[in-house]
Image (cartoon, rainbow, N blue to C red):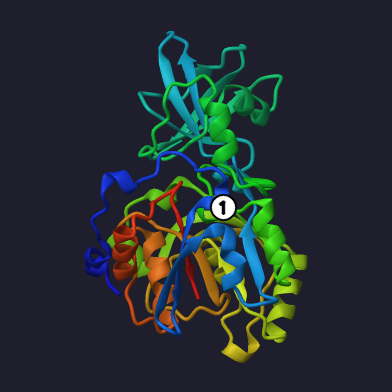
Amino acid sequence: MKFEDIGKYDYHLPQELIRKRGIEPRDAAKLFVYDTVRDTVFHDTFANLAEYLPRRSVMALNETRVVPARLMLRKETGGKIEVFVLANEMGALNGDIPVLVDRKCVPGMKLGFPDGSFFEVVSQDENRFFVRLRSDFLLETLLDRYGSTPIPHYLETGNEDNEEAELRRRYQTVFADSGASVAAPTASLHFTDRVFDSLEKRGIESVRVGLDVGLGTFAPLRKDNFETKTLHRERITVSADTTDRLNRAKKEGRPIVAVGTTALRTLESVISSADDMNRVFHPYSGDTDIFIFQPHRFRSSDILVTNFHLPQSSLMLLVDAFLRDKGSKRSLVSLYEEAIRERYAFYSFGDSMLLL
């Protein structure tokens, strides 16, 4: 595939199919099931996910946490400035904190919190600034106290007093545990205790991986992405316990289910590129920049749970590559068009898709 082909990944989505709030219960979201072997489509709800998965599958989930990374601070002159903390990048840095700002900013400037704490701007790198925190509190404490949830701009936020508290609950998976993301792994937002109970009854095991989602997820694709086969860097973590369980599943012939494009990107980053008979997962903590588009031979996963993604996005290309590798008789766009006819909701708070 070439950059010039990206127009093939466009589709028309009625605005009313962009769900602006998470639904309750979470597992009431619709589930679009496409069986690539039988070329059949089923329509159900996410609560019944387990019924479509092979018994004794192993499911990989991204346990990253979304942090309230958007701050409204004040310059020394008294003017307001919005500061977006790139929390997902901090794990790879020592000391200085990378941020984005919405207005003029220069090194030496101080950006104040309401309690007297402040960021001191120390340097600039293209559109990013680097700041140092001057405070008696940890950054995590200040973000929790003054930050807001960094939901995508196409979602309405409203003016309700409890809006931020609700977003912190709803734009977070029920199993979020570690890491720091500035966007949610949305395919996992549908999981509930009831879904996990039903998976356990079918002998479906869950393992956790970590990928800290960054703003690069939403960046437009460029020609050089295709030439270098790389994207924005994101920090991933896969423990030895997780790889041991995944490798054991491979040896036993048990299907591996990637929950979301973030989990799939992580798994493809930590599996060896050896022949199909000798694929091995390796523990890893560091960055990945792989860009997956067709043609791509997937070595890590057999089944994918995902949401419906923005047109011409890297996420859509990843899902399409997965479909093509499985020998799908239908294109991803044609499946999206059917979902639109069936009134599925799209994007972050949208419905779910299962590709078998």
Please name whichever residue, 219 or 226, is drawn nearer the observer in this view of the structure.
219
Q: How many marks can you see?
A: 1
Please name whichever residue, 356 or 266, is drawn nearer the observer in this view of the structure.
356
Q: Residue at x 56, y 72 (%)?
A: 52
Mark 1 neighbour class, 10 Å CA radius: few under 14, some 14 to 19, many 20 or more:
many
Residue beneath disc 1: 27
Which percent across, then down, holds residue 82?
A: 43, 24
Q: Residue at x 55, y 80 (%)?
A: 299
User: In the rendered image of this protein, does residue 25 appear above or below residue 164?
Assistant: below
Which percent across, then down, holds residue 107?
A: 46, 25
User: In the rendered image of this protein, does residue 80 appear above or below residue 253?
Assistant: above
One can see residue 238 in this view: no
One can see residue 216 in this view: yes
Q: Residue at x 41, y 78 (%)?
A: 40
Q: Secondary structure at mark 1?
A: helix
| Quarter residue 90 falls in | top right
| Quarter residue 210 falls in | bottom right
Identity of the amino acid at label 1? Asp
Which percent across, then down, holds residue 231?
A: 42, 60
User: In the rendered image of this protein, does residue 208 appear above or below residue 279?
Assistant: above
Please name whichever residue, 174 or 51, is drawn nearer the observer in this view of the structure.
51
Q: Quadrant of the N terminus?
A: bottom left
- Position of 251 with respect to 302 (left or right) is right
Please name whichever residue, 208 or 179, is drawn nearer the observer in this view of the structure.
208
